[in-house]
Each structure stands twice: as C-alpha cells, then as structure tokens.
Image (cartoon, helix red, strand yellow):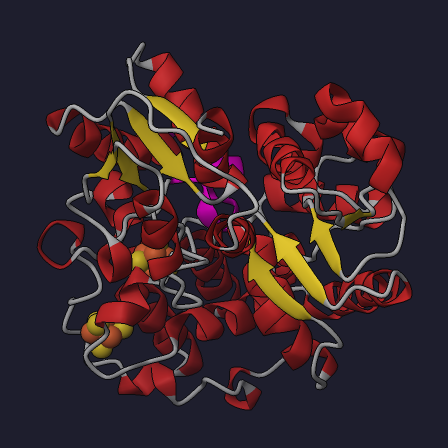
C-alpha cells in the first residue's frame, strides 16, 4: 500500500517534532524510551520515520525496517497520544502503519499470529484447556458452563491458561456464588478477542474473531458481558463496533463494576480485617484508552481498612506495566525495566499489595517482583474482595 492512501498520512506532517511525547521523566510519556534510549521507540521517532519514508528520504526497505522496529518496541500505552501537543491520534496511526510492515514482522509476532491462526488463542495451546483457570472451583464451573444467562463472562487467553492470572476469574465466580447469583461462562467456546491481531496490524483477522465471539455470546442470551482483561475490554467494547461497523448486541463492563454492584446491592458483605497498604495500577487499555479510572477507586474504598496510595504515575499519567503492546514478546528486557520503575514507586511508599485489573499487568509485575525477591504481592482487586468476604 502507498503511504499516501493511509487515513493518518497527513499526521506525519502535522507532528511538530517538539519531543513532548519522548520524555518519560518530565512528561510521564514514553516508557520504552526510558529503557531503550532509542528515539525510534517513541511517537516522534515513528512520525519522523514515516514522514521520511513518505518523502523518499529513506529507501523503502530501510524505512520499513526502521518503522517496524519503532512500532514493535512500543507498549501501545497511549501516553504519547495523551501528551501530544497537536492531538495526533498516534495509537490509531501506529495500528494503520503496522498493516504496512507485514513483510518485516519480528519473529515473536509471527509466532503469535501462527498460534492464533491454528489454535484461536495466543499461546497455541488446545482450546480444550481453556478451562485450566477453573480447577479450584470445578463445581461452580460445571454448573454454569455454556448455560444461558443475562450476564456472561469473557475470560480471555491470559487468565485462561496461566494459573496466577487465572485466580481472577475463579474469584469472580466464587463471589458470584456467594451473592446467590449466576453468570454464564463459555470459555471452551471462546476464541481470542483479537487484540494481538490488532496490535500486529491484522484488522482483517481480528474481524473474523469478533464475528465469531459475538455469535457465541448472542446465542447464550447474554445482555451484559463482563471482562477482567483490559485488552479484551478495549477490543470488545471499542474495536468490535468499529471493525464490524455496527453496535454490539450486548453491553460490556469490567469485573470491577460487576463486583462493586454486588457490594452496593448488599449481596456480598465485606469483613473488616487488618489494615493493608495498597496501590492500584491503572491498566493503559482501561485508563488512557477507555477512560475507566474511578470504578477501581470506588471498589477499593468499599473495602474497610484498605488504603490506596496513588502511585506517582496514576490515572492519565499511569505507567505501562511493561508488557503492553506485545512488547514482552519482542523486548523482554524493556518490559522488565519498565516494571522496575513501578516497583520502585511502590517500594518507596512501603506498599504491601499491588492491585491490578488486568491479567497482563498482574502477571508481568508478579514475575518481576518475584525476580527481585520483593515482599510486595501482585493480585487482582477482586482477589482482595474475596479474601475479605
Ligand atoms: S504508545 Fe507508549 S510506548 Fe508507544 S510510543 Fe507511545 S508512549 Fe511510547
Ligand atoms: S508530542 Fe506530538 S507533535 Fe510533539 S513530537 Fe510527539 S507526536 Fe510530534
């Protein structure tokens, strides 16, 4: 495709090269620049490269290779877009540019695509094993799986296959049972939400997954869909309607909103236990991408004796956990460096629990905390709610 045909072509020339999006330290902007010190990782770096390519200042191979490096050494955190002085829709421009570099994709991205093509999940594992998360709550799972209900739960690939993030859906089901409610789970039929295809520039393939998942959800009569993954939430609620050019036949909410409603309706009662110091880590795809900030604070405030110490980077200025945008697959060291900034902020405040609302954040921070032998624990907010019921 000719660069001139891109929807965001003009934006390459709008960029003022001010560098406001580059500096993590002063502007809470690019976390990957903090680790790589390579301008190509930043918003400005990608805009300059695309402009040089469009003007013929770089030959095609050279330009697309450099652009690929920039596009895949990026967490898709949206911090650049948040601070851009001329309001360039940078993350959408990145997604469009990624469609141009399909012949140059990094090995890790190609592997993810292969897994998705063959197995419909990001890990290339058997679809039958999508219920690994439910081992400790088998009875509830067996009772509710594939049964119609007004409220349904999309588990997502990360929590489905890994035991640490898999504790989150198990906690949501236990809390639902305690509240004498029922939700529909359909994890054996779930296909990946499609986020990795979008992050890799294959919107066409994400569209196929969107069509399939919507059909499964519709057939179970689900009117409200819960997600506990920030990526699934963003993609299903924001991207599916754009990809398919039509409204969703159901509403999408976060697991925090759902559990908070059970507390407000007095369906779950929370005990007052020992005081604990926590910090909520805003996931980029919930916060900056979708504007979801308050519900986490409301939920935390509804638990007695739990005090939230805001991180130095919070809400619109939140820092990526390091694993966003498939960065961990391509640049694991950068993912560690970024998680370490967060951990240092928590250690400074003597935080005991890092509360998450995304399996990728939870998992990446957990791995790094363990590596550093830190006393801080990384859990999902709803795990804390369950502990205190
Ligand atoms: S999305 Fe995040 S990591 Fe990527 S260029 Fe923007 S600020 Fe940097
Ligand atoms: S903040 Fe916006 S205008 Fe300034 S360098 Fe970054 S992308 Fe360009």
Is any part of residue 27 visible from this angle? yes
> In which quadrant of the rendered view does residue 78 lie?
bottom left
- The residue located at (74%, 25%) in the rendering is 137
Q: Residue 202, relative to residue 119: is it above or below?
A: below
**Picture coordinates of residue 17, whole percent (x, y):** 19, 74
> In which quadrant of the rendered view does residue 238 lie?
bottom right
Q: In the drawing, does residue 168 fall left or right of residue 142?
A: left
| Of the pair 280 and 273, the residue shown nearer to us | 273
- The residue located at (65%, 41%) in the rendering is 176
**Picture coordinates of residue 260, whole percent (x, y):** 48, 51
Is any part of residue 199 visible from this angle? no
**Picture coordinates of residue 82, whole percent (x, y):** 27, 69
Give yes or no for residue 330 being in the magenta stretch: yes
| Of the pair 92 and 358, the residue shown nearer to us | 358
For the image shown, how many numbered marks are present on the structure?
0
Q: Residue 193, relative to residue 96: is it above or below?
A: above
Tell me the quarter of the image containing the N terminus: bottom right
| Of the pair 234 and 148, the residue shown nearer to us | 148
- The residue located at (53%, 68%) in the rendering is 95
| Of the pair 309 and 247, the residue shown nearer to us | 309
Main secondary structure type of the part rendered in magenta = helix
Give yes or no for residue 327 being in the magenta stretch: yes
Q: Residue furthest left?
A: 26
- The residue located at (44%, 22%) in the rendering is 367
Quarter of the image where ligand 1 sits = bottom left
> In which quadrant of the rendered view does residue 16 lie?
bottom left
**Picture coordinates of residue 111, whole percent (x, y):** 70, 40
Q: Residue 343, relative to residue 25: is it above or below?
A: above
Provide the residue span drawn in magenta: 322-333
Q: In the drawing, does residue 126 fall left or right of residue 249?
A: right
């Amino acid at each position: 495709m000719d660069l001139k045909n891109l929807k965001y072509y003009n934006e390459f020339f709008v960029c003022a090269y001010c560098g406001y999006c580059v500096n993590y330290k002063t502007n809470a902007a690019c976390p990957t620049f903090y680790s790589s010190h390579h301008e190509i990782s930043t918003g400005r770096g990608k805009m300059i490269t695309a402009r040089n390519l469009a003007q013929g200042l770089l030959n095609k191979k050279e330009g697309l290779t450099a652009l690929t490096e920039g596009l895949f050494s990026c967490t898709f955190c949206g911090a650049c877009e948040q601070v851009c002085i001329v309001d360039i829709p940078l993350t959408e421009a990145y997604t469009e540019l990624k469609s141009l570099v399909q012949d140059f994709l990094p090995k890790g991205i190609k592997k993810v695509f292969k897994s998705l093509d063959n197995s419909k999940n990001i890990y290339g594992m058997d679809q039958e094993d999508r219920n690994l998360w439910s081992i400790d709550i088998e009875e509830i799972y067996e009772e509710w799986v594939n049964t119609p209900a007004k409220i349904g739960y999309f588990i997502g690939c990360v929590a489905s296959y890994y035991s640490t993030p898999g504790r989150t859906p198990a906690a949501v089901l236990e809390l639902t049972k305690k509240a004498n409610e029922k939700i529909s789970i359909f994890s054996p039929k779930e296909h990946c939400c499609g986020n990795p295809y979008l992050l890799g520039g294959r919107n066409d393939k994400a569209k196929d997954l969107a069509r399939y998942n919507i059909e499964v959800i519709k057939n179970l009569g689900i009117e409200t869909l819960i997600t506990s993954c920030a990526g699934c939430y963003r993609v299903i609620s924001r991207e599916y309607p754009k990809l398919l050019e039509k409204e969703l036949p159901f509403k999408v909410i976060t697991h925090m909103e759902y559990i908070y409603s059970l507390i407000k309706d007095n369906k779950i009662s929370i005990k007052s236990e020992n005081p604990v110091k926590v910090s909520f880590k805003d996931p980029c795809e919930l916060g900056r991408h979708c504007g979801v900030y308050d519900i986490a604070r409301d939920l935390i405030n509804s638990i007695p004796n739990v005090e939230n110490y805001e991180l130095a980077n919070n809400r619109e200025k939140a820092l990526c956990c390091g694993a966003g945008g498939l960065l961990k697959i391509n640049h694991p060291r950068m993912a560690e460096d970024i998680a370490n900034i967060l951990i240092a902020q928590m250690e400074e405040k003597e935080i005991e629990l890092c509360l998450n609302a995304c399996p990728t954040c939870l998992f990446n921070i957990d791995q790094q905390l363990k590596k550093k032998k830190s006393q801080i624990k990384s859990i999902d907010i709803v795990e804390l709610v369950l502990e205190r019921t």
